[in-house]
């Protein structure tokens, strides 16, 4: 019975830890989305006061402006230019989504590693 209680505590601790790590990952994704939209670091530092390391870390990732290419594709009169701008939009949007996903995964991984150590 004693071992069953210990196992249940370990399993419940892991579940709580995983929920906390998912929350950290979701926060990191929001920070990266905000970084992609905001070129000024000080605005995000003000918004995410408690997570300044995360914000500064996000600014090491390039900003991907997919909307510029989408606007160019919509405004283009020439079909060849429009197709090229759509391709550029698709490429930049893919980089944008990958940057957010990788940043989120980085913070989930850091959280899980710290749970395992602690």
Image (cartoon, rainbow, N blue to C red):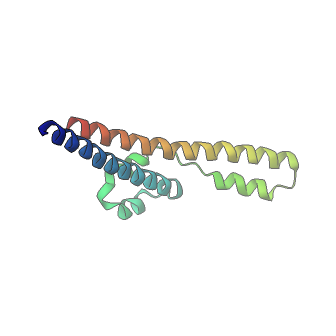
Seen from the viewer's position, the closer of residues 107 and 35 is: 107
Residue 60 in view: no
Q: Along the horizontal axis of the image, is 48 left or right of 99?
A: left
The residue lying at 54 percent from left, 49 percent from top is 63
Q: Is residue 36 left or right of residue 54?
A: right
Q: How many numbered discs?
A: 0
Check the image and report above or below for 114 versus 19.
Answer: above
Q: Is residue 33 visible?
A: yes
**Pick the front one: 90 or 5:** 5
Q: What residue lies at 40% left-to-right and 40% top-to-bottom?
A: 106
Q: Position of residue 29 (x, y in %)?
A: 45, 51
The C terminus lies in quadrant: top left
What's the residue at 61%, 43% (across, down)? 94
Q: Nearer the viewer, residue 40 or 69?
A: 69
Residue 116, quarter of picture: top left
Q: Quadrant of residue 109?
A: top left
- In which quadrant will I find the N terminus? top left
Q: Is residue 40 left or right of residue 20?
A: right
Position above or below: 109 against 31: above
x and y percentages locating residue 113 in the rendered image: 29, 36
Q: Residue at horizontal 28%, vertical 49%?
A: 16
Residue 48 pos. (x, y %): 36, 60
- Is 16 placed left or right of 92 in the picture? left
Query: Residue furthest toward the front?
Result: 1
Q: Residue furthest right?
A: 78
């Amino acid at each position: 019975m004693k071992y069953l209680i210990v196992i249940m505590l370990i399993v419940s601790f892991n579940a709580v830890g995983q929920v906390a790590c998912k929350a950290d990952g979701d926060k990191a994704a929001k920070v990266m989305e905000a970084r992609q939209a905001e070129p000024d670091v000080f605005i995000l530092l003000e918004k995410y006061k408690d997570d300044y390391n995360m914000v500064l870390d996000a600014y090491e990732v390039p900003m991907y402006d997919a909307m510029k290419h989408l606007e160019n594709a919509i405004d283009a009169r020439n079909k060849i230019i429009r197709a090229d701008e759509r391709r550029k939009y698709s490429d930049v949007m893919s980089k944008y989504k990958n940057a957010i996903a990788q940043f989120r995964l980085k913070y989930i991984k850091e959280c899980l590693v710290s749970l395992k150590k602690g």
